[in-house]
Image (spheres, rainbow, N blue to C red):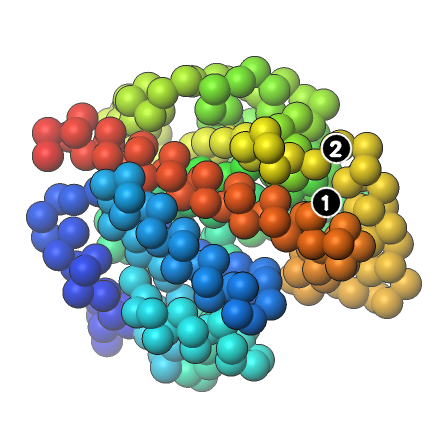
């Protein structure tokens, strides 16, 4: 089999690819592992609508029946929202999940790789994975970071998840040559908050400027992603000290329950949502929609630069 035989592209996405229309890739982990049913499916469809409203085509990516799905139907989204035992698929898991024909929800790394296979250049997500707190002992560093060093897909995210070690994650991205550009402010955001205590390495203020940076990077043959950090809208952000307290409690509970590896992030996010009376879930939904909007605007600007 060739690589193409492992991929099923939704007709709407195929039409966009054939006609050089702007496309934004979206991940499916948020559907199967990020939120409860039916909020997960409702949010996924609303995020797709945000992309369309800004002039681009959404391509939510997942794995099912041995195929990489690029673009999901409404029924597909409902399936991944309700199905039990859906794998959380990072890059290392892709061959196994495809070969065994298991259902899989793709993380940042897997979504980027599949998007790259079909030529999609822009990907919007909530927050990227990174260097976990205590990584000097556990060596827990997300595959999202190594994938970003190699794959020519820009990632629009609300910075780095605040449950991670943000400083070490920024250092790692610098080492791997991944530009980190914050949209519209000097402070680097931290998912639930527009600030993190760290300044952004770079700043740009328009979708057109972001598109020009991307075009310049890839035209020069400099492979890899760009992290476009897009702060959560001010009306939804949470107070830093408050969210840090919940993070510390969540980390202590995860350690007590011996939760490790790829199960850590979903556990922490759920724990924080349960202990903030849903405030963090509301913030999560708001920032994902905001990233989808900005991702679509950058995708449109990038296609315009390319002369389409």
Q: Is residue 201 above or below residue 120?
A: above
| Residue identified by numbered label 1 | 163
Q: Report whether 33 appears left or right of 304.
A: right
- Picture coordinates of residue 80, whole percent (x, y): 46, 73
The x and y percentages for residue 42 are: 46, 62
- Image location of residue 250, percent across then percent down: 82, 54
Label 2 element class: loop
Mark 2 crowd level (few <14, some 14–19, many ≥20, 10 Å Cα): few
- Asked whether, in this view, residue 287 is left or right of residue 77, the answer is right
Q: Is residue 152 left or right of residue 103?
A: left
Marks 1 and 2: in contact by CB < 8 Å? Answer: no
**Where is residue 70 shown, x and y percent of the image?**
30, 62
- Circle 2 sits on which residue? 239
Tag in front: 2 or 1: 2
Which of the two labelled residues, at mark 2 and mark 1, occupies the earlier sequence position? Answer: 1
Q: Is residue 12 above or below residue 238?
A: below
Residue at the (53%, 41%) spot, across then down: 287
At horizontal 31% and vertical 33% (from top left) the residue drawn is: 297
Quadrant of res 9: bottom left
What residue do we see at 63% from left, 52% from top?
281
Q: Which image quadrant: the N terminus?
A: bottom left
Q: Secondary structure at mark 1?
A: loop
């Amino acid at each position: 089999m060739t690589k193409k035989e492992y991929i099923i592209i939704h007709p709407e996405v195929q039409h966009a690819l054939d006609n050089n229309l702007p496309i934004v890739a979206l991940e499916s982990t948020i559907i199967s592992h990020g939120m409860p049913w039916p909020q997960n499916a409702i949010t996924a469809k609303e995020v797709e609508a945000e992309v369309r409203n800004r002039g681009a085509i959404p391509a939510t990516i997942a794995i099912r029946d041995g195929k990489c799905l690029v673009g999901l139907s409404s029924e597909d989204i409902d399936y991944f929202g309700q199905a039990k035992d859906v794998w959380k698929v990072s890059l290392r898991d892709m061959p196994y999940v495809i070969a065994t024909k298991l259902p899989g929800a793709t993380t940042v790394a897997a979504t980027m790789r599949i998007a790259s296979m079909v030529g999609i250049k822009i990907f919007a997500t909530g927050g990227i994975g990174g260097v976990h707190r205590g990584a000097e002992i556990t060596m827990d560093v997300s595959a999202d970071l190594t994938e970003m060093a190699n794959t020519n897909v820009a990632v629009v995210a609300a910075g780095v998840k605040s449950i991670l070690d943000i400083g070490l994650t920024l250092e790692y991205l610098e080492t791997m040559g991944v530009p980190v550009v914050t949209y519209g402010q000097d402070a680097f955001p931290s998912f639930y908050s527009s600030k993190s205590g760290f300044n952004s390495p770079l700043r740009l203020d328009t979708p057109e400027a972001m598109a020009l940076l991307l075009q310049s990077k890839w035209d020069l043959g400099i492979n890899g992603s760009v992290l476009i950090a897009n702060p959560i809208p001010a009306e939804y952000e949470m107070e830093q000290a408050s969210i840090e307290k919940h993070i510390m409690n969540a980390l202590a509970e995860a350690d007590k329950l011996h939760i490790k590896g790829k199960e850590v992030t979903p556990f922490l996010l759920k724990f924080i949502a349960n202990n903030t009376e849903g405030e963090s879930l509301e913030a999560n939904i708001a920032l994902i929609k905001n990233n989808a909007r900005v991702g679509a605007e950058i995708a449109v600007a990038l296609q315009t630069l390319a002369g389409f």
